[in-house]
Amino acid sequence: MSYIFPEHDLDLSFLFEIADGSDEFIVESIDMFLQQTPDLLQTINTAIDNKDWTLAAQAAHKLKPNLGFFGMPISQATIQEVEIMAKNGAPEEGLLISKFTDVKNLIIPNLDRLATIKASKE
């Protein structure tokens, strides 16, 4: 079974490569992502609502490497843009919100895909 879904910005080939056949590693890695990512997305969302650009940038920065690890390059690049805009005080707040919405719309469905893959490996 292939775990590459370019249409969903999800390519787990790196995860499977470093797992070297260990389903336990895959399950633990996905589990950690599934625990942390919704919290980070919520933190960014709340920070944007409160115009707390420092917190939004920090949470985006924490999320960014996880997206790369799970083969989500479009999401990773977009969250980096959110991070940079937030660090700069969100001079174009509407654009920041739009980009964050775009990245959420890519990541959230992937959480379900990852949960399904995790279940198949348990």
Image (cartoon, rainbow, N blue to C red):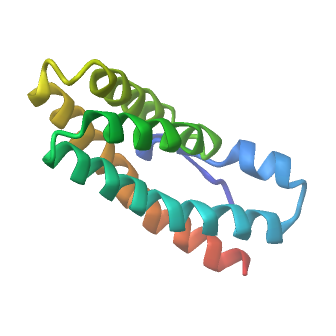
Give the position of the C terminus as an image quadrant.
bottom right
In the shown orientation, is residue 38 left or right of residue 4?
A: left
Q: Nearer the viewer, residue 75 or 79?
A: 79
Q: How many marks?
A: 0
Residue 120's quadrant in the figure? bottom right
Q: Position of residue 111 (x, y in %)?
A: 45, 63
> Residue at image x 28%, y 18%?
88
Q: Position of residue 74 (x, y in %)?
A: 43, 32
- Give the vertical position of 68 relative to 85 (above or below): below
Residue for point 52% across, 66% down:
34
Residue 38 occupies which quadrant of the picture?
A: bottom left
Relative vertical location of residue 13 with respect to residue 73 in this rendering, above or below:
below
The N terminus: image quadrant:
bottom right
Tell whether 1 sits left or right of 78.
right
Q: Residue at x 51, y 32 (%)?
A: 73
Q: Is residue 64 left or right of residue 84?
A: right
Q: Position of residue 78 (x, y in %)?
A: 37, 30
Picture residue at 90% right of the left edge, 54% below the top? 20
Decide which of 58, 41 is in the foreground and name it.
58
Classify 101 as above or below 111.
above
Asked whether, in this view, residue 83 is left or right of residue 65, the answer is left
Q: Position of residue 102 (x, y in %)?
A: 25, 40
